[in-house]
Image: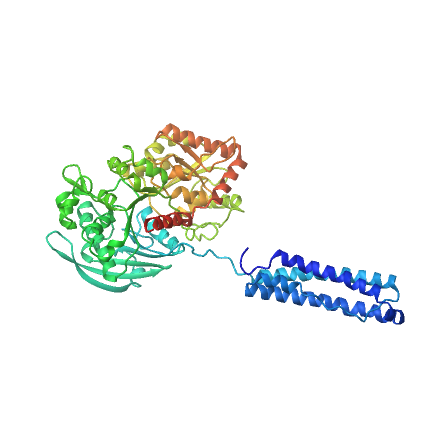
Amino acid sequence: MARGRVTKTAEKEVVEKVTKEAPAETSTVKTEGKTAEEEPAKAVKAVKEKEPAKTAKTVRKKSTAKAAKAVKEKEPAKETKTVKKPVRRKKTVKEEKPVEAVENVKEENAAEEAKVVKAVEEMREVKEAVEEPKCEAAITPRRSIAFIGSECYPFVKTGGLGDVMYALPKALVKQNCDVKVILPRYKCIPWKYQEKMTYKGSFQMNLCSDGRAFYVGIMEYVWDGVVYDFIDNEEFFSSGDPYVNLIDDIPKYCYFSKAALAALNYMDWIPDIIHCHDWQAALVPVYLRTLFENTKLTSAKTIFTIHNLRFQGIYNIPTIQYWSGLPDYVFNKDALKQGYRDANMLKGGLTYSNIITTVSHTYAGEIQTAYYGEKLDAHLRYHAGKLRGIVNGIDYDIWNTATDSRLYANYDITNVLEKKKENKRNLQQELGLVQDENKFVLGLISRLTDQKGLDLLNSIIPQIMDEHTQIVVLGTGDSKYEDSFRYYENAYKGRICSNIMYDETRAHKIYAGADALLVPSQFEPCGLTQLIAMHYGTVPIVRETGGLKDTVEPYNMYSNTGNGFTFDRYDAGLLLDAINRAKTLYFTNRWCWDEMVQRDMDKNFSWDNSAKQYKDLYLELTR
């Protein structure tokens, strides 16, 4: 029982007290008969006017006021004692006409009981008013976390890493964590953020193996309880885009990894955990265990998260050794060395970190196989004991159908079935498609690359298209896919719209207006599009790989369960079969489809669950 609440026992005793008092007064009327024989009218008046008023008033005042006082003082034991205090009896009332007096008292007792019930209700209201509001108190120990990565929304974003670097720290603040995010200060960061940054200091840092030093500036920006520290250096971060080419990116991120640790030392902010993301920050654990081993930072534990194993930061050993300034012994086959002449920055991060995480459970297992392992499967199997998988979430402050200003019509789970039709009609009108809410609209929001399974989709579009189906494409990428979708738009006018660009507003509208979303990826570490689609009531059609398999339960027609349509092997025929199964359910069993839409919207894809898992991991590591 929560502190400060009035117990049900106390309420029961209020009723029992008044019930017992009423018969006691009746007995008094029956036994004391001398005065009542002389003044019957006076006796009846006394019973009617004095006793009920006093009893009800006493019960209401004492039970309500003292119950509230007991709640405020948080002394449940005193409540019972206070409620049981007896009411003084009147000895002046005596019986002359027993039958008439008893009838009057019975009526008065009924009135008293009604007033007692009212008093109890008032006491409950007092209990609810005084009761402290519920809040999720942080019950886990506080931890300080430093996030180090190459991009973060809204400052700079090229993919899912930017979303994670923004949303996860914000969610961890609610989990009783102090969070600092360290990023490069790219020239492409919008000025509205740069002008609000504050200068925190600067210093010179030795970087290269020949002792060459570089300037390190620290600019700080605080937002939503998270501190963002930007590493400032015009020589490395003056280009318009965060990623250019390996020749330029290798020196840039060698500098960034070392400067991030040097900045923590300079600010004397020693975190419990240093959480690094992807190959651009992979040298941080290596630096911490080598060049920074005699600093205060040596007490920090490191976690390295793989967002996409395909990108590893591989270059020849002499170049990485020069720009990193790392000792010779780290360039061996168990750490940075790959093959005979190359160094792999991501491999070094895997070796020297305390824990390795990926962005889904299935992907953590897949990357230990030759098919998905990108030539690091043996290395990952060796380190499997420290490998974990935690699925990403989506930020409900951004992706919320009830408040999303980019939608044609806002909605929630209670009115999704009607409002999605309205969003569909408006989307069809805006994109030049035939306006018909009964058409089956397939959405595709993706980078147009082989990884996303577009070779499968490209080969079956003629078989998908019929008079009842429409396709909406949004994204950029390989020219062969851009040109292919332009061709199909011209071949199926009014039924296919190819938006060869990326427009955030249009993406929101497609999520809300489409019936189903295609994610036929060859591999997918986590995937956010299927999570957003389900949250917006759009049914995903996905391949069972990585995070897609972890988050999308295949539909079962016999039990009417599941929240999407899936296929396992990377095969165009299986993708076509999954699309046809979705269309069949949509056109022949709409109520089952509508139930799936509502199930999808009811699922919790917020960062709260993921943040709690990361917090547990931090506690496990610093125990």
Front residue of 137 and 467: 137
Q: Is residue 446 toward the left or the right of residue 120 in the image?
A: left
Q: Quadrant of residue 266?
A: bottom left
Residue 494 is situated, as x and y percent measured from the top left of the image, at: 42, 38
Residue 102 is situated, as x and y percent measured from the top left of the image, at: 84, 61
Q: Residue furthest top?
A: 573
- What residue is drawn where x is 15% and y is 50%? 325
- What residue is drawn where x is 88% and y is 67%? 96
Res 455 seen here: yes
Res 238 seen here: no
> Considering only vertical position in the picture, is 334 above or below 265?
above
Front residue of 125 and 316: 125
> Considering only vertical position in the picture, is 583 above or below 76?
above
- What residue is drawn where x is 49% and y is 44%? 602
Residue 278 is situated, as x and y percent measured from the top left of the image, at: 27, 46
Q: Quadrant of the N terminus?
A: bottom right
